[in-house]
């Protein structure tokens, strides 16, 4: 994968700004998440134990951590595209020698 020039920096800044907001969301929305799982099951006439909902809420933190790790890995291994200069074709284009 290749990014446009300066895209890695923009993506890193975007990631750094979203990370604290995600942490705050996970901290303060856990009780609401558990309550909504139990209420949704109750409205459909099913029984959903609070302990199971707590487990799902706990697993969501691990899922978010895994997702962040994958995003950082992709960001680390992607390279930026070189800019095209006048008279020199880009690598891999029909007119290049590479």
Image (cartoon, grey):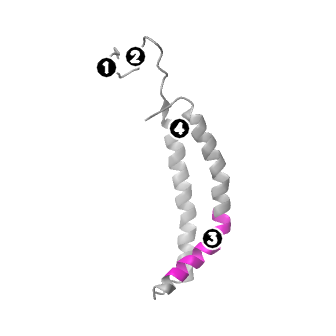
Residue to which mark 2 is pinned: 89
Residue at the outermost top position: 87
Residue to which mark 1 is pinned: 94
Q: How far across and down, in percent of the image, does residue 1 sit?
A: 43, 35
Residue to which mark 4 is pinned: 76
Residue 52: within the magenta? no
First reached walking from the N terminus: tag 4 or tag 3: 3
First reached walking from the N terminus: tag 2 or tag 4: 4
Between 96 and 79, which is closer to the camera in this rendering? 96
Whether residues under marks 1 and 2 lie with C-beta atoms below 8 angstroms apart, the answer is: yes
Q: Which residues are magenta?
A: 26-40
User: Which secondary structure lies at badge 4?
Assistant: helix
Q: How far across and down, in percent of the image, does residue 58 sit?
A: 57, 68
Q: Quadrant of the C terminus?
A: top left
Between disc 2 and disc 3, the foreground one is: 2
Q: How far across and down, in percent of the image, does residue 26 sit?
A: 63, 63
Between disc 4 and disc 3, the foreground one is: 3
Badge 1: few (under 14), some or many (20 or more) residues near its Cα, within 10 Å? Answer: few
Between disc 1 and disc 3, the foreground one is: 1
First reached walking from the N terminus: tag 1 or tag 3: 3
């Amino acid at each position: 994968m290749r990014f446009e020039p300066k895209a890695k920096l923009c993506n890193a800044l975007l990631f750094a700004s979203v990370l604290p907001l995600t942490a705050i969301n996970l901290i303060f929305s856990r009780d609401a998440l558990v309550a909504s799982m139990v209420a949704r099951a109750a409205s459909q006439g099913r029984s959903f134990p609070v302990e199971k909902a707590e487990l799902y809420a706990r697993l969501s933190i691990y899922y978010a951590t895994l997702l962040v790790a994958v995003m950082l890995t992709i960001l680390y291994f992607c390279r930026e595209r070189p800019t095209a200069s006048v008279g020199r074709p880009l690598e891999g284009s029909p007119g290049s020698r590479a």
